[in-house]
């Protein structure tokens, strides 16, 4: 790597670190229920070796009737040995893996571009991909919260990079098998995409791989070891533990006929190629900053140009990138919530590679034809404005506009309860709130040993520990002698509240009454 490349690489890396670590515990404004569940289960595993249900060293975590891969919680355990249980600690593994993903996007792009032959612009394209990923709204969004898909994407990037290196040096196939194996245990969508994509890669590069003969046996065994839990759950009739809630949200479980399901799959697939979704609106409000898409609008011309460059390519590079995109859309297209930025996060490096091809092509053209310098200057100003606008929307405006979507208020509610705990014999929390028991366990840092000795999480709607009860509240039938504190949702019947916690938009989040 030449000195200039090293300087640019280091600068981009520092930018990626800053954008993912700065004020991590406060932006987004609050942990959501999945983040809290991941955090408390990691805390419980650290203290007891068991999850909230008392399962010892689980492979999957049962949570809210769903089954989540346990890998993120295990990655969080060493973090909790250093930091207190809180927002920063829970999000730190995702932020670190986001940074690692940015680093390896550079090395992956360089290996992919070697498929084009002697491509002299590989270093600058690779640095451009690294920069685009470092500042990507899509990647920042999921690197700054505890999203398992972000972990899976980074493991995939490393595994894919190692696979390409392994075509020349078989020792890297060990790393590839292990990293791709971990991606399967990080997020549900990769359990479908990675095997499909790997089969395609094996077919495309079969001549290189077959030349290794028996040397492929050990990487194959490593890969098989990661599959054993899936075979076990499938053979014991617990397939829901493999795919979690996906088995309930597929188009097959929500369609009356096979024809209807096939139609929905096709429709869902096409919705993911919507430029409006990518560049303007996004989907779920927790998946993007206010008034923005998951990619910058200024990327669109470069993206379109990059597609044209890709389609004209005659090497295996085109086949690999196109298969990455086409197969990467499959898992999300099989579900009812489409388009979906989390389930398609695995695509983001491929889209940035395409965009980088367009950026470099335009940059080289401008460099050769000086007459284009003036319009290029104005477009650079437009790009700069896009950065400033996005950073304002994400790092400032999002907390004010989207506090309710991030389940804001639990920390304040628990803080109020903790300050007034001694005044009451019992604290009742309404189940109309979103999974309140796990938030109270988390923010109270309730001793997991004590929690499990009290029965742990029940497979019922009602939960309880210590003096806390989590259930539906019938206000007229409750005790109102001043010995019970009630934490209510705005829709619960109640008397005059003694305290109210509000979202940033002024709406009521929690009503506290006796």
Image (cartoon, rainbow, N blue to C red):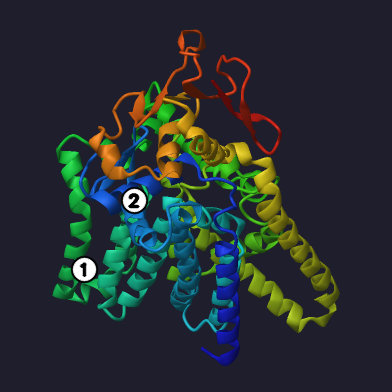
Q: Residue at x 79, y 63 (%)?
A: 382
Residue 10 shows in this picture: yes
Q: Is residue 296 above or below residue 510?
A: below
Quadrant holding the C terminus: top right
Where does the image place residue 289, in percent across and percent down from the top left? 65, 48
Dot label at residue 78: none
Residue corresponding to mark 1: 219
Q: Nearer the viewer, residue 264 or 431?
A: 431
Q: Is residue 463 above or below residue 374?
A: above
Q: Nearer the viewer, residue 283 or 170?
A: 283
Res. 445 image quadrant: top left
Crowd band around label 2 with a 10 angstrom C-alpha radius: few (<14), some (14–19), many (20+): many
Q: Is 487 situated left or right of 361 in this image?
A: left
Q: Is residue 226 above or below residue 127?
A: above
Residue corresponding to mark 2: 42
Q: Is 268 situated left or right of 275 in this image?
A: left
Q: Nearer the viewer, residue 205 or 427?
A: 427
Where does the image place residue 292, in percent across and percent down from the top left? 68, 48
Where does the image place residue 508, in percent across and percent down from the top left? 64, 28
Q: Residue at x 51, y 88 (%)?
A: 1
Numbered marks: total = 2
Secondary structure found at label 1: helix
Residue 297 shows in this picture: no
Where does the image place residue 88, in percent across and percent down from the top left? 50, 56
Q: Residue at x 41, y 58 (%)?
A: 151
Give the Cα separation between the discs numbered 1 and 2. 30 Å
Q: Residue at x 34, y 62 (%)?
A: 78
Secondary structure found at label 2: helix
């Amino acid at each position: 790597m030449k000195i200039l490349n090293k300087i640019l690489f280091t600068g981009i890396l520092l930018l990626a670190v800053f954008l993912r670590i700065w004020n991590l515990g406060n932006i987004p404004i609050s942990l959501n229920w999945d983040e809290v569940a991941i955090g408390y289960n990691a805390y419980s595993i650290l203290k007891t070796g068991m999850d909230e249900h008392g399962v010892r060293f689980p492979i999957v975590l049962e949570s809210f009737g769903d089954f989540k891969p346990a890998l993120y919680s295990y990655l969080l355990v060493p973090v909790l040995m250093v930091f207190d249980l809180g927002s920063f600690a829970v999000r730190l593994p995702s932020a670190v893996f986001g940074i690692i993903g940015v680093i390896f996007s550079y090395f992956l792009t360089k290996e992919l571009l070697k498929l084009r032959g002697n491509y002299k612009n590989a270093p600058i394209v690779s640095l451009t991909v690294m920069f685009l990923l470092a500042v990507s709204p899509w990647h920042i969004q999921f690197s700054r919260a505890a999203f398992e898909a972000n972990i899976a994407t980074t493991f995939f990037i490393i595994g894919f990079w190692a696979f390409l290196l392994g075509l020349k040096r078989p020792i890297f196939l060990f790393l590839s098998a292990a990293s791709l194996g971990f991606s399967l245990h990080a997020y549900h969508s990769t359990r479908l995409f990675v095997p499909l994509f790997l089969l395609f890669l094996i077919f495309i590069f079969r001549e290189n791989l077959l030349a290794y003969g028996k040397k492929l046996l050990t990487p194959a065994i490593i890969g098989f070891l990661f599959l054993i839990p899936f075979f076990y759950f499938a053979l014991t009739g617990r397939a829901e533990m493999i795919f979690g809630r996906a088995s309930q949200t597929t188009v097959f479980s929500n369609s009356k006929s096979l024809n209807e399901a096939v139609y929905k799959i096709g429709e869902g697939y096409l919705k993911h190629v919507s430029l409006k979704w990518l560049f303007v609106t996004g989907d779920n409000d927790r998946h993007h900053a206010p008034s923005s898409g998951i990619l910058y609008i200024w990327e669109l011309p470069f993206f379109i140009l990059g597609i044209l460059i890709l389609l004209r390519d005659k090497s295996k590079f085109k086949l690999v990138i196109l298969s990455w995109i086409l197969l990467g859309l499959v898992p999300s297209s099989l579900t009812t919530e489409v388009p979906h930025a989390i389930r398609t996060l695995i695509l983001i490096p491929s889209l940035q590679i395409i965009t980088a091809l367009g950026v470099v092509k335009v940059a080289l053209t401008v460099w050769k034809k000086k007459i284009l310098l003036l319009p290029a200057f104005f477009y650079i100003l437009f790009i700069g404005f896009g950065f400033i606008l996005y950073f304002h929307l994400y790092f400032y405006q999002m907390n004010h506009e989207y506090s309710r979507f991030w389940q804001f208020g639990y920390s304040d509610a628990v803080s109020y309860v903790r300050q007034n705990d001694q005044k009451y014999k019992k604290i009742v929390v309404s189940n109309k709130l979103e999974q309140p028991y796990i938030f109270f366990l988390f923010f109270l840092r309730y001793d997991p040993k004590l929690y499990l000795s009290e029965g742990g999480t029940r497979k019922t709607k009602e939960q309880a520990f210590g003096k806390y009860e989590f259930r539906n509240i019938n206000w007229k039938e409750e005790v109102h002698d001043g010995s019970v504190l009630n934490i209510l949702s705005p829709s619960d019947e109640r008397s005059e509240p003694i305290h109210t916690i509000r979202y940033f938009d002024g709406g009521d989040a929690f009503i506290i009454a006796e």
